[in-house]
Image (cartoon, grey):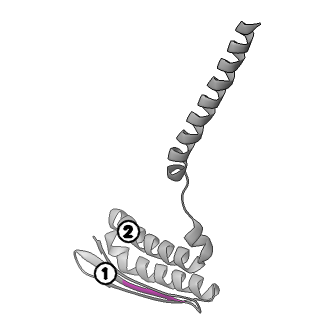
């Protein structure tokens, strides 16, 4: 009977050690496994602004690969599209670009009742 009690104690101790190990392991892994989207849920303006900026950069890069002569027309079309999306969401988008032989520089401002976001950036050609 004494042997059965020792086995039960060993089993319980092993279960507690494993549970503790996995708990500690989960605390180290969890912060790195989830993307924090709380700032985008809080403010749609930030999400839209970053998306417009990202797609402007992508427009320059894709046009450079496919047909560099269409860059200005593609950026004008993209600007008009982005301004329409902003307007449809109740925002004002100022979107200006300057094209040179080596780069495209952008000035963007997105304004709403709550926030005003501004960015100036250069994309190499």
Magenta part of the chain: 107-111
Q: Residue 16, located in which quarter of the rendered image?
A: top right
**Which residue, as the protein is rendered here, is positioned at the far left?**
102
Q: Nearer the viewer, residue 44 or 121?
A: 44
Residue 63 at x, y percent in the picture:
37, 68
Q: Nearer the viewer, residue 17 or 31?
A: 17
Q: Main secondary structure of the magenta part?
A: strand
Q: Residue 56, located in which quarter of the rendered image?
A: bottom left
Q: Secondary structure at mark 2?
A: helix
**Which residue, as the protein is rendered here, is positioned at the far front?**
2
Which residue is at 74% across, 10% downward? 4
Classify residue 100 as left or right of residue 48.
Answer: left
Q: Secondary structure at mark 1?
A: strand
Residue 22 at x, y percent in the picture:
58, 36
The residue indicated by pointer 2 is 63
Question: Which label is found at residue 105?
Answer: 1
**Which residue, as the protein is rendered here, is positioned at the far right?**
1
Q: Nearer the viewer, residue 84 or 72?
A: 84
Q: State whether residue 15 is above or below residue 39.
A: above
**Marks 2 and 1, the one that precedes in the sequence:** 2
Residue 20 at x, y percent in the picture:
59, 36
Q: Please rate how many residues cluster around mark 2, counting C-alpha atoms within 10 Å: few if below 14, some from 14 to 19, many from 20.
A: some
Question: Which label is found at residue 25?
Answer: none
């Amino acid at each position: 009977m004494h042997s059965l009690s020792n086995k039960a104690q060993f089993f319980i101790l092993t279960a507690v050690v494993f549970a503790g190990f996995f708990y500690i392991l989960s605390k180290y892994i969890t912060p790195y496994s989830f993307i924090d989207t709380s700032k985008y849920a809080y403010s749609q303006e930030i999400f839209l602004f970053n998306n417009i900026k990202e797609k402007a950069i992508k427009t320059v890069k894709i046009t450079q690969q496919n047909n560099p002569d269409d860059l200005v027309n593609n950026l004008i079309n993209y600007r008009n599209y982005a301004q329409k999306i902003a307007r449809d969401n109740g925002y004002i988008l100022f979107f200006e670009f300057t094209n040179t032989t080596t780069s495209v520089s952008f000035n963007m401002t997105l304004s709403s009742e709550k926030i005003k976001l501004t960015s100036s950036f250069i994309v190499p050609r």
